[in-house]
Amino acid sequence: MLSGGGAKGSFQVGLLDGPIHTRRVSFETAVGTSTSAIQTAAVAQDDLGAPVQFREGLKRPIIGG
C-alpha cells in the first residue's frame, strides 16, 4: 500500500525501482491512492520505466537566476 501526497510519488518510484529491477522482486497486489496510484499502475504492469524517466527528468528550480 502506497499513500498519496505529491512529493512522495518521486520517492516511491526510486524506492520501488531498486527491488524490482536489481532483485527481480514482484508483487501480487499493488494498491495506491492519489499520486501513488500512478506508481501502483506501473508496478501492476511490471513497467516502472516511464515513472523512473519522469523522476530523473525533474530539475530543481533556479532561484534568483
Image: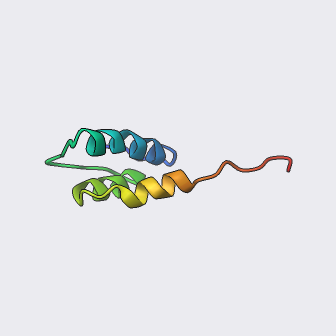
Q: Nearer the viewer, residue 24 or 41?
A: 24
**Residue 54 pos. (x, y %):** 49, 58
Q: Residue furthest front?
A: 22
Image: 25 above or below 32: above
**Residue 24 pos. (x, y %):** 21, 43
Is residue 60 visible in this depiction of the protein? yes
Q: Nearer the viewer, residue 41 or 18?
A: 18
Left or right: 31, with 51 as reference point: left
Q: Residue furthest right?
A: 64
- The colour style of the image is rainbow
Left or right: 10, with 22 as reference point: right
Is residue 1 visible in this depiction of the protein? no
Q: Residue at x 20, y 41 (%)?
A: 25
Number of callouts in the render?
Answer: 0
Q: Residue at x 77, y 49 (%)?
A: 62
Q: Residue at x 71, y 50 (%)?
A: 61
Q: Nearer the viewer, residue 39 or 37?
A: 39
**Residue 46 pos. (x, y %):** 24, 56
Left or right: 14, with 20 as reference point: right
**Quarter location, residue 45:** bottom left
**Residue 1 pos. (x, y %):** 27, 42
